[in-house]
């Protein structure tokens, strides 16, 4: 590798610099890597050192980006991994970040799953729909069973009743066409036929 001719701050990304070489090539390097390797104008870098600089820089870059992501929303291990893969990071580097984040409790699949369950329940989604969403995130089956445990208020049939109070307050259980349409509405949202029937009976009888 040639010598460094210039180190210029890169305005689009905080704490990143563009390093220019006398063979007219340039690379984007973060400040920590520059300090760690003592990079400065006029320094000659051999190929082995250059590769170490790039590897160190890439590790810093993926870590910084991953921290940025989790600071804005909850991620499961899978969703964070998929996001990093979509940005072009290498799988071995991603696995290291995921492992480290789990150790630091920066990502926690059980906490993620609990938050997702509560959110989807608030959106009127039923158990089948929610379990499928959790499986899409590769959530462990034991975690799924734990976070899907319901208290009386969040029993599926009670969720149906609460939705009916808001959307189907004039529900007529004697109208077969209305019963069919309403049942299909809840089936599409992941509720079982048993819970739908139980909710309809209680709603009609006023056992709320």
Image (cartoon, helix red, strand yellow):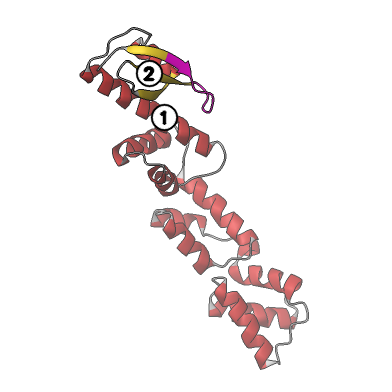
Residue at 51% x, 48% y is: 112
Residue at 69% x, 70% y is: 163
Tell me where residue 172 appears, x and y as whole percent: 74, 87
The residue singled out by tag 1 in the image is 61
Q: Measured along the vertical axis of the image, is residue 106 above or below residue 5?
A: below
Q: Nearer the viewer, residue 175 or 13?
A: 13
SS type, badge 2 = strand
Q: Can residue 144 be seen by looking at this rendering?
A: yes
Residue at 28% x, 10% y is: 44
Callouts 1 and 2 close, C-beta under 8 Å = no
- Please indicate whether residue 174 sits to the left or right of residue 21 in the image: right
Magenta-highlighted residues: 7-15
Q: Counting residues from the N terminus, which is met first, the one under dot 1 or under dot 2?
A: 2
Q: Is residue 207 magenta?
A: no
Q: Measured along the vertical axis of the image, is residue 102 above or below residue 2?
A: below
- Please indicate whether residue 187 sits to the left or right of residue 139 in the image: right
Q: Nearer the viewer, residue 121 or 17?
A: 17
The residue singled out by tag 2 in the image is 20
Tell me where residue 11 appears, x and y as whole percent: 54, 24
């Amino acid at each position: 590798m040639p010598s460094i001719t210039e180190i210029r701050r890169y305005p689009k990304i905080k704490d990143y610099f563009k390093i220019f070489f006398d063979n007219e090539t340039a690379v984007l390097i973060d400040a920590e890597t520059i300090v760690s390797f003592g990079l400065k104008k006029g320094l000659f870098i051999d190929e082995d050192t250059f590769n170490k600089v790039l590897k160190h820089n890439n590790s810093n870059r993926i870590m910084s980006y991953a921290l940025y992501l989790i600071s804005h929303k909850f991620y499961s291990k899978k969703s964070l991994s998929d996001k990093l893969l979509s940005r072009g990071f290498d799988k071995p580097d991603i696995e290291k970040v995921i492992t480290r984040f789990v150790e630091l409790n920066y990502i926690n699949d059980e906490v993620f799953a609990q938050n997702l369950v509560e959110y989807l329940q608030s959106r009127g989604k039923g158990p089948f729909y929610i379990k499928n969403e959790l499986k899409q995130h590769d959530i462990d089956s034991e975690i799924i069973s734990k976070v899907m445990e319901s208290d009386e208020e969040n029993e599926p049939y009670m969720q149906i009743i609460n939705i009916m109070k808001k959307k189907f307050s004039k529900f007529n259980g004697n109208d077969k066409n209305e019963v069919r349409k309403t049942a299909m509405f809840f089936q599409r949202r992941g509720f079982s036929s048993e819970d739908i029937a139980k909710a309809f009976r209680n709603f009609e009888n006023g056992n709320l």
